[in-house]
Amino acid sequence: ADEFRRLMSKFRDTEEMEAMRAKFVESAIATHAGSAAPVTLGLANRVFDLVSKFVGYGFCRSHAAAFARTVYQSAYLKAHHPAAYMAGVLEHLPGFFPIHSIVEEARLFNITVLPACIAWSGVKYKLERLGDELAIRVPFTAVKNVSPEAAADIVLERSLRPFESIDDLYRRLKLKSDVWDTLAKSGAFDIFGTRREVLWHLRRLKKTDNKTGSLFDVPLELEMPRDHLLMRVLTIQEETNWNFQTQSLTTGPHPMALRRPELEKLNCISVHQAFQRKPGSLVRIAGAVISRQRPPTAKGFTFMIVEDESGRIPTALQPALYEQFSRVLREGSLIVEGRLEARGNGRQYQRIPLHLYREDLV
């Protein structure tokens, strides 16, 4: 029995599984030949038919029941307490989808995700009242280089007295140089000025600290009129890039939304628009690749989930095309073209068998 189980796991192919039928049936009949309940030819074949289905995908009943309970509980929380549910998912990161995709899913459910902020963020994702709704606040720990200990130090110091300026922050907190920089680039200090202004001010403070040994014995020649700090404000695209560099997420627009005018010139439609088309329609979609899978049971097919600002759509890539475009497939975002394929009842599941790939978008 154990050998048979290992062979099922190894082959994962219905034809190779069928080749084992004769040996299975023969062994089952021989094993129970002298028992009070011998196995007949028909029974052995029926058992083989039942077991062979697990070559594709299957759960034992106890596992299925346990998983069904988890699915029901998750569905209930997502329907009745969506903000709390999504905050929990962001905090614990189950692992299948990247964090920026979970943030995007929250927004698609009309949940506001607030950026990391020196005045409001904490050690973990938390809920904040925003009018009549609940919003999710990104924590300090979502910013690269910020440890839970550093985040806790910030929260503790803030509880004693609110931070009043960058100078006040630098005087009261003992953070590593890279932590200051990533917090500033992430926008956590935006209440004190633009990101470029804050970065310049921090570097001035670090330079002064290294030279004088005192944080605020600042030489007069380092003081500059406010007009000199009017640096160019980041564009939305630059801000989005900085958000991804420092947090692997953005609470601003989806990257594809920023490229939508350009993508429309390339005849790309949104995922939402694609789902309005009839099965068999040829569509071209641009999006971030948030999942790639090439399961052994798929006969060489590769499955990817592509996401834009309006939703997600599964795609399927034939083996020959995978070999042809394997290098391109490693890119973070792609333009894909193919025909919509309906599966199941009505429009419950659609996917695009891909035929065309283009260069990386971002």
Image (cartoon, grey):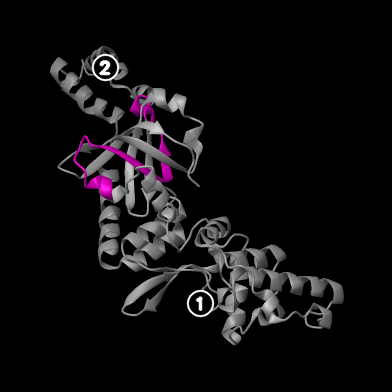
Residue 289, quarter of picture: top left
Residue 36 appears in the picture as rendered: no
Q: Residue at x 15, y 21 (%)?
A: 43
Q: Secondary structure at mark 2?
A: helix
Q: Label 1 is placed on what type of residue?
A: Trp
For residue 132, above or below residue 319: below
In what quadrant of the picture does the N terminus appear?
A: top left
For residue 344, above or below residue 71: above
Across and down, in percent, residue 193 comes to: 60, 76
**Residue bearing the label numbered 1:** 120
Q: Earlier in the sequence, mark 2 or mark 1?
A: 2
For residue 126, above or below residue 350: below
Of the two numbered discs 2 and 1 in the rendering, the one whose residue sits closer to the viewer: 1
The residues tagged by marks 2 and 1 sit, at their Cα atoms, a distance apart of 62 Å
Disc 2 crowd rating (10 Å Cα; few below 14, some 14-19, many 20+) is few
Q: Residue at x 39, y 58 (%)?
A: 104
Is 132 or 277 nearer to us in this picture?
A: 277
Magenta-colored span: 273-301
Is 134 or 29 nearer to us in this picture?
A: 134
Q: How many marks?
A: 2
Magenta run includes residue 286:
yes
Across and down, in percent, residue 201 comes to: 70, 74
Residue 18, which numbered label? 2
Q: Secondary structure at mark 1?
A: loop
Residue 101 appears in the picture as rendered: yes
